[in-house]
Image (tube, coloured by chain):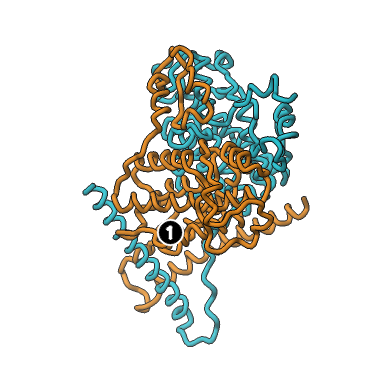
Chain colours: A cyan, B orange
Amino acid sequence: MTKKIEEKSDLTRRNLLGRAGLALGGLVSLGALQGCGDGGGTTEEPPPPPPTGPQVNEFPYQQHLPDGYAMADLPAVQEAAYHGYYAGGCCHGAYSAILAKLAADVGAPYDKLPLDFGKFGGGGIASYGSICGAVLGGVLHINMMVADATARGNMMTDLMRWYERTAFPMYSPAAVDAAETGLTLDFSQSNLVQLGVVPGTHLCHGSVTRWCSEMGVAAGGADKKARCARLTADVAGKVAEMLNAYLANAAYTPAGRDDTSNTCVACHTPATTNKPPVASGMECASCHSDKVEGHPGL
Amino acid sequence: MTKKIEEKSDLTRRNLLGRAGLALGGLVSLGALQGCGDGGGTTEEPPPPPPTGPQVNEFPYQQHLPDGYAMADLPAVQEAAYHGYYAGGCCHGAYSAILAKLAADVGAPYDKLPLDFGKFGGGGIASYGSICGAVLGGVLHINMMVADATARGNMMTDLMRWYERTAFPMYSPAAVDAAETGLTLDFSQSNLVQLGVVPGTHLCHGSVTRWCSEMGVAAGGADKKARCARLTADVAGKVAEMLNAYLANAAYTPAGRDDTSNTCVACHTPATTNKPPVASGMECASCHSDKVEGHPGL
């Protein structure tokens, strides 16, 4: 408690000093520009304050990318995401790997953002089992970059749908992380396909629980972590691919929903009132498998 | 397509001009500071560049709050969140109302963040039915402010649990939004309790579908929007309260999980391998109601 209060006071002082410095810096620069160079006394207008480059609130950030920009060397982004998982969880792995790449390639405003922002999302947000954190990290980047609102939404839903239907893990790291010890399963590249399970949901809870159940391993163990670290790399790579495709085409064609779910929402439309209206873009059968066969009234 | 390419080129030009301006501005200021004032020729070291105040990457932002800070006038934050819903969805409503309050009270770095960042989260992220967008907007603010990692995680899970168990909507707006037309239900303050339904889940899909089913209204209609606008205000108010309580006490005591779910995870621990291991902090009975009565093996 005492430490926290001290820390806060110290930081508040820093904050106040920072603000004082900002005001002083502004005055010094303006005074220097107005009073120097030609001895003063001129009637010329002082030049406008210089622009300070791309800012965080100039959003979304597609506007700050050079023409023809694409993220190159995606395996390096995936490798960073894999190691990032062990440094701060799935959301941190995916989010920080893409952010670091964009900051290195593009600079501002990406280099003004906190690299640790995504740590909250691990395990489906603070281990709650909500949306897979790697997917959430990807969604945050799609949100930050994509200027076209329709494409942005379609890319987010397609990412979640792709995740629901894809057998994870797929990525095989170039260098196994030092924290990866105590595995009971064979994660070597040649055996990885044997460990692949389709989550059937974009939620961490169902994704992790299903994989661990099928593999017969603990949800809190080393094998689960090794799976999620590789999945984090898979998702980061997919997001980077999607962003590159969008930038290359200046458009995005959505992949859309699965056929079974399309059958469901053909009756359970947002407009219906004589049967349960469904507000969802998810795969219906993930939770409502009892409705796929022997649906009431069909 | 042509418009998009033109827009991108224009923005890229702006970007390049901005960067050139930044470099030029830096040179001008430095030159002015070095060559003016005392006629030049001194051997004094030039002063270090002035600090520029709290930056976005100085994260989390509790360090930038004045001592004793609390968000005052929470009904105004709630009212802004309610109207924000009609301007850009549930996540935008909650996120932008709290951000605007913090930016007005604290300034940087909150005033350097884009107010529209939360628009992606509406309807459980791009209408996918994932995590309730208002909750996600709140989670983002908890993430941005709370310095203590344990408190941060507990606050996020408590927010999601509170949402699962709370009958929405509760908030009654001071002024009904101009976009709110065509209601079939009575949303007046005296009748609001009659419209309250406990979501039983933190996901938009279950929350909206259950409420609309119980009310007999469409998931895409005016009543659903009126409910979600008020719920957005409810969530924004709760998040502001939680942040204020954390700041006042420099600590956070978690409310914890419901008793039924605690019974479930006592056997389905993250360490178990002889029964499905559960990776979740959610309320189990929301989806697994069949397990509450007549659980296999019990």
Q: Quadrant of residue B205?
A: top right
Q: Position of residue B257 (x, y in %)?
A: 39, 33
Q: Is residue A91 above or below residue B6?
A: above
Q: Dot 1, crowdedness within 10 Å: few (<14), some or many (≥20)?
A: some
Left or right placement of residue B297 versus residue B249 in this view: right
Residue B264's x, y, as percent? Answer: 42, 23
A252 and A149: which is toward the camera: A149
Q: Nearer the viewer, residue A102 or A238?
A: A238
Q: Is residue B163 visible?
A: yes
What chain is tagged by disc 1?
B
Rendered residue at 60%/25% (across/down): A200
Residue A230 rendering spot, x and y as whole percentages: 52, 26
Looking at the image, which is closer to me, B112 or A270? A270
> Left or right of B272: which side holds B249?
left
- In the shown orientation, is residue A218 left or right of residue A285? left
> Residue sitting at 64 percent across and 39 percent down?
A279
Inspect this view and state whether residue B114 appears: no
Q: Is residue B150 left or right of residue A120?
A: left
Mark 1, residue position: B74
Report the amino acid beneath label 1: Leu
